[in-house]
Image: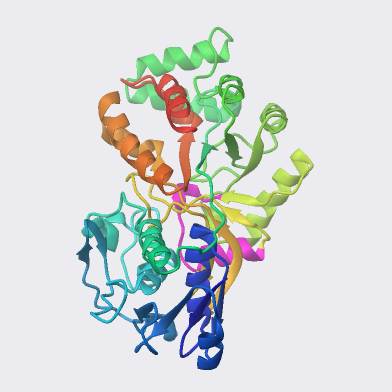
Amino acid sequence: MLLIFTHKITNRLAYTARQIFEGILGIEVSFTTKVEDFIKHSGPKITYSKQPLQNEFFIRSNDLLFEQGINDLDIKVSDWDGVPCFFSSGEKSTIPYDIFSASFFLLTRYEEYLPHVKDSVGRYPVKESLAYQNKFLELPVVDIWAYRLLDALMQRFPNMKRKKRAYNFTSVINVTTSHSYALRGVARTFGGFLLDLGNLRFKSIVDRASVLMGFKKDPYDNFGQLIKIHKKFPIKTMFFFQMAEHSAHDKNISPNNSKFRYLIKSVADYSIVSLSTSYVSSTDKTVLKEEKDRLSNLINRPVRYSRLRYNRVSVPTTYRNLVETEFTDDFSMGYTHEIGFRAGTCTPFYFYDINMEVRQPLKVHPFAVHDYALLNYDAQAAIFEKMDAIYRNVKQLNGSMVCIFSNELLGGSHQINWIELYKSFLKRYYV
């Protein structure tokens, strides 16, 4: 067991140290404020404070983990042997940065609590983030820092024991529009025809008519094909379905449609099925619970996992709502149109509510890649070059590679054959 001596044990410190040592590195950790207990401890140990006691492994602490609430921090990002880091810890410190404070800042999305202008659908803009502005968004820096700390500790304590994690890959299929033309009812179908006609989308008119007359399969209805693909690879796959009423932002099939309900039940026979929340339910707990109960009653099992519409995470409110409606895991921590690690990590972590200064029982599964971010690249070679770099980092760190795909993009008409690209992803990155 690793012992950390500090002048004050706070919730922030306990949360961050446990995530780094137990969550990422697989090392059991405990804390003390008593000098005599620290001296007596014969195993690996660290002092995390302003001054070392003697000549022990020492990390000079920033004030962040001993504060409360939100403050406007002056952060200067520097280079740590080729990797960006911040909160310099001075010459006496065994490592040059207070990675506990830096990790806390990223994991809690501290900067998202600060005043900012949201985008058109209410999201924190990626270009406002410290990681984007300092060009380390595509690096899981929290995990990299943790392993650098491990290297330094192993030099001092070569017999230190730890439980190694294994790399894993999770494919998430997000279903906010299960069908492009089918199952939409008379009024919406007629409106679709008129809209296509008004915009001179003649191909869409032909495709819609072909699907409705049974000559052609709906392009978004690729669920059978996806299940067949998934059977070939021993990976974790998940489908997130919407169970929302029609609105300006949510235009899926009615949750009362019998064929749509049958589709969800049939997919649930082969894969994990959970809730893709609606735009409205992101901020309305009553609607969120209604959608959750609808899906749970349909598939006859508890619904514990969530994905937020547009990845519309607004800390801390959104995650508080998920906790209060008894979700245990969320898969929305990432950016829709930008590849990278929004929370700076490729390891699942628990949500820490800064306003309440407490770790909440909601596990956050960060994703680095959303398929809509790949639309920024016009060739497969460019996509794989970017994906390979992400994969190498996550694999080397024994992390979790979570990728978000949509049946909509996989079934759409594009220059790239996305379903074939998806197969290539699974072959390339599942091990």
Please indicate, yes or no, whether residue 355 appears anywhere in the rendered image. no
| Res 102 → quadrant | bottom left
Q: Nearer the viewer, residue 21 or 206?
A: 21
The percent position of residue 241, horizontal first and vertical second, equals 60, 39
Q: Residue at x 35, y 20 (%)?
A: 201
User: Compared with residue 277, is residue 45 higher up or lower down, i.e. above or below?
Assistant: below
Indicate the quadrant containing the N terminus: top left, top right, bottom left or bottom right: bottom right
The percent position of residue 92, horizontal first and vertical second, equals 27, 82
Left or right: residue 30 compared with residue 59: right
| Res 362 → quadrant | bottom right
Left or right: residue 58 compared with residue 301: left
Q: Residue at x 69, y 26 (%)?
A: 259
Q: Residue at x 48, y 43 (%)?
A: 402
Q: Residue at x 70, y 37 (%)?
A: 256
431 within the magenta span: no
User: Compared with residue 150, is residue 223 higher up or lower down, i.e. above or below?
Assistant: above
User: Compared with residue 202, is residue 122 higher up or lower down, i.e. above or below?
Assistant: below
The percent position of residue 43, horizontal first and vertical second, equals 53, 74
| Res 55 → quadrant | bottom left
Q: Nearer the viewer, residue 208 or 96?
A: 96
> Which residue range is magenta in the image?
307-324
Q: Nearer the viewer, residue 31 or 337?
A: 31
- By secondary structure, the bulk of the magenta-drawn segment is best described as helix
322 within the magenta span: yes
User: Compared with residue 146, is residue 381 higher up or lower down, i.e. above or below?
Assistant: above
Label count reads: 0
The percent position of residue 386, horizontal first and vertical second, equals 29, 36
Please, which colouring scheme is shown?
Answer: rainbow
Please indicate, yes or no, whether residue 103 appears anywhere in the rendered image. yes
Q: Residue furthest top?
A: 215
Left or right: residue 410 compared with residue 291: left
